[in-house]
Amino acid sequence: MKRSVAMMACVLSGAMVLGSFSPVMAETGAKAVSATVTDSKSSDDKKDDAKADTADKKDDAKDTVLEDGTYSAEFGTDSGMFHVNEANDGKGTLTVKDGKMTIHVSLNSKKIVNLFVGKAEDAQKDGAEILEPTTDEVTYSDGYKEEVYGFDIPVPAIDEEFDVALIGKKNKWYDHKVKVTNPQKEADAEASDTKETDTKKATAEDLKLEDGTYEFDVTLTGGTGRATVESPAKVEIKDKEATAIIIWSSPNYDYMIVDGEKYEPVNKDGNSTFEIPVTVFDAEMEVTADTVAMSTPHEIEYTLNFDSSSMKKAEK
């Protein structure tokens, strides 16, 4: 402002030096001063607006109120060493009761022995509420199961970072930032998944297939991703029941389990081959296969999906 007034003074002074005072020049100088002040206020206003907008967003996050119930929610952290176990896809179980939120997360191991919601320095004070671990069992994509530590962590707000301190076996506290986002009510998600699956899946009877042998493209998921099955697979229809011939890419499978029933291989040489019932088409059919390729026999969970749109009569 002082600089603007000085500029105005210079303009007026110049006019006096020229021997006459020009109203036009005075008006021009006044407009320049006014514009400078206006621009300055505009800049300040923009900063204030930005601060207000940020504050509003934080208030909105704090004011997010979820109905009582159980949700699936993402649990993000600032550390590659402290995060949700990979078997749980970055998510924990968020429980809301009487307006209070708690998320249960299973971690990667048993190396983190305690948590504290707040700063590390506060965790070491008398009366600090230290969170004790639970022992959780997680199942990886290859079917391997492992025991890890989990924690029930109070959540002050959704979509807003908060402080969590942790201590490991070296007895040293560390500060971290975490955030809980994208809560999805589990009942709603399950209902949606069930509805979508129900509209697609079909039985042999639904497909109205005559007795005979057909070929279906089949997709295998689960395990490490290295195993495959031969596709298309032959499927025999008899009395509205479907039986598939599943040929694995390995000779190391010694039995399969489908719908609680155990099935032995139908061959002695070559890749493991099974005749199993097809309980559903166009949807994930859960199966278990036991492999002897590891040091000890190991049951692995898979899914098979038989695509009815690819169906054709098998060549004789």
Image (cartoon, rainbow, N blue to C red):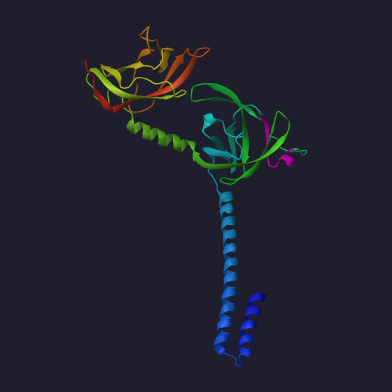
Image coordinates for residue 278, horizontal then vertical, percent: 34, 20
Q: Nearer the viewer, residue 309 or 3?
A: 3
> In what quadrant of the picture does the N terminus appear?
bottom right
In the displayed structure, 209 sits above or below 118; it is above
Q: Residue at x 47, y 36 (%)?
A: 187
The vertical placement of 72 against 218, above or below, is below
**Span highlighted in magenta in the image:** 112-123
Residue 231 visible to the viewer: yes
Q: At 55% across and 48% down in the image, what residue appears?
A: 64
On the image, the x and y values in percent for residue 72 come to 51, 37
* Residue 121 included in the magenta stretch of the image: yes
Q: Residue at x 62, y 81 (%)?
A: 8
Which residue is farthest front?
18
Q: Is residue 42 magenta?
A: no
Q: Quadrant of residue 280?
A: top left
- Locate the C terminus by quadrant: top left
